[in-house]
Image: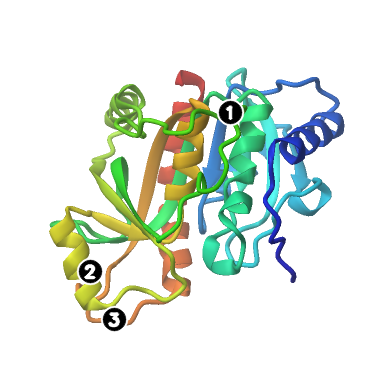
Amino acid sequence: MSFPQETLGHPHVVAAAAAIADKLRSSIPVAAVGVVLGSGLGSVADVVVERGGSAIDYGAIPHFPTSSVEGHKGRLVFGRVEGTPVLLLQGRVHRYEGYPASSVVFPVRVLHALGVRKLIVTNAAGGIGDGFRPGDLMVIEDHLNLTGDNPLSGPNDARFGPRFPDMSEAYSRRLRKLCFDVGETRGLALQRGVYAGLLGPSYETPAEIRMLKSFGAHAVGMSTVHEVIAASHLGVEVLGLSCVTNLAAGLSSTKLSHDEVKETATQVEQEFSGLVLDLLPRL
């Protein structure tokens, strides 16, 4: 698999959005709510397809990056949840795969071009917070971008947003409250905390986990932060959800593996899917 190294700008976004709208036989914009589904969390999109939604493989969309990571199906799904039009990214790409940051955030920019103004970003993460257990769902209150990269580096395209976007509420306070309200209705005890985004693909060392905990992180992963920065740049309201699939290095007696991540995500997918599907029409 080869990875594009060119900067994907506004014309590429417009071309991809137009192709998607054409395939869906819909005019832009087509949706108000978007979802990015992380490792092993794609069952929400499967439900939308089963309810009459449409799916497009990433490879059929101009300029769209395709994932090489197991557990990321790699398709865009369009459908309705209780009448609300939604677009879901069933899988994402990561910087560690060799993609430049502009490719990592390209799908989020395309969702915006298709009308998305509210976005749920999900991930599988290692738990750091006291009392966190595999299977917990955490509402992200803030993040630490420790990837050493930023998708807004380089010349700014004002069509995406301002040169210096504010990040003081990257994760919407309103949407967080709504998520806790829906979680309470469903009888879920949701965690809350700070997500630390690192480059990967190696898992963190125990020393790095101790450092992250001292920084105030409650969960750690290899995604999300770039997408949220790009979404904030675009003025999109964001809700972030982490599925704690394992305890981070040094906090468990077992070695970390991607198989464990997928297995735990599968175990909680019904709980996770129910929460997201209940949230979508309320956003």
Alpha carbon separation for disc pair 1 and 3: 48 Å
Badge 3 amino acid:
Thr
Q: 10 Å neighbourhood of mark 2: few (<14), some, or many (≥20)?
A: many
Can residue 68 be seen here? The reply is: yes
| Mark 3 nearby-residue class (10 Å; few <14, some 14–19, many ≥20) | few
Query: Where is mark 3, residue-wise?
Result: 254
Report helix, strand or loop for mark 3: loop
Identified by mark 2, the residue type is Ile
Instruction: Assess disc 1: are there few (<14), some (14-19) or many (≥20) residues with their C-alpha within 10 Å of its C-alpha.
Output: few
* 47 displayed left or right of 193: right
Instruction: Tell me the mark number nearer the camera, choosing from 1 and 3.
Output: 1
Residue mark closest to the camera, 2 vs 1: 1
Q: Please state which of residues 269 and 9 is positioned toward the viewer in this rendering.
A: 9
Looking at this rendering, what residue extends furthest in the front direction? 155
Element type at marker 2?
Answer: helix
User: Label for residue 158?
Assistant: 1
Q: Is residue 79 left or right of residue 176?
A: right
x and y percentages locating residue 164 in the rendered image: 42, 33
Q: Is residue 47 visible?
A: no
Q: Amino acid type of disc 1? A: Ala
- Quadrant in which residue 148 is drawn: bottom left
